[in-house]
Image (tube, helix red, strand yellow):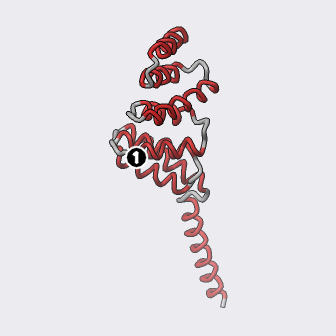
Amino acid sequence: MATIAKRRNLILLVLIALGGLGAIGCPRSPQAKEARFMSRGKEAMKKKDYSRASLEFLNAVKVMPKDAEAYYQLGLAYLAAHNPQGIAALRKATELNPKHVDAQLRLSALLAGSANRRIVEDAQKRLNELLALEPQNVDILDVLALTKLRLGRPEEATEELEQALQKF
């Protein structure tokens, strides 16, 4: 009878140990999972493996669908791979966090290259809002100058570039 109890206890210990190892091996929280995907995605970007990076960032987006940074990184990976879905990912990042400066700036720079006047005006609006947040950001002034040039206002574009040079 004692040996049966010992066997049962041994089996229980083994099951607990195996269950415990499984819990240690994979992160439980969505934030921890996202952090792993983001880290692996950034490593893939460094290696210029944009398809792997896109997959990792896409997994991060699935785990944390309301995180603007995950969409921003996904957008960068898509753009690096010449995938036009990068624009949609950047748009989503800016919808989730309108104050995400890098996402707004990158999206605005892409929009500024459009032949469609309304799209260029949208870029200019975004940039003016960013400039209110970061008035010393030279990159914002550079892209803002481009939008003004594209909208047929070269004098204003020149002023923006002069301001950028002064702040640089």
Give the side of residue 139 with respect to residue 133, left or right. Answer: left
- Which one is nearer the viewer's eye here, 67 or 15? 67
Image-quadrant location for residue 99: top right
Residue at 41% across / 52% down in the picture?
Answer: 55
Q: Give the side of residue 17 with respect to residue 39, left or right.
A: right
Residue located at (52% from left, 20% from top): 141
Quarter placement of the N terminus: bottom right
Tell me the element at label 1. Answer: helix
Which residue, as the protein is rendered here, is positioned at the far bottom? 1
Q: Residue at x 44, y 50 (%)?
A: 56
Position of residue 87 relative to residue 63, above or below, is above
Q: x and y percent of residue 148 in the render?
A: 47, 22
Identity of the amino acid at label 1? Ala
Left or right of 93? Residue 44 is left
Image: 140 above or below 23: above
- What residue did someone put label 1 on? 53
User: Where does the image place residue 42, in percent across and percent down from the top left?
Assistant: 44, 41
Closer to us: 53 or 106: 106
Q: Residues within 10 Å of mark 1 (few under 14, many from 20)?
A: many
Q: Position of residue 30 (x, y in %)?
A: 59, 56
Vertical side of 70 occupied by 141: above or below: above
Name the foreground residue: 9 vs 107.
107
The residue positioned 64% from the left and 25% from the top of the image is: 132
Q: Out of 126 and 31, give the one closest to the viewer.
A: 126
**Is residue 140 positioned above or below 28 on the image?**
above
Q: Position of residue 11 (x, y in %)?
A: 58, 79
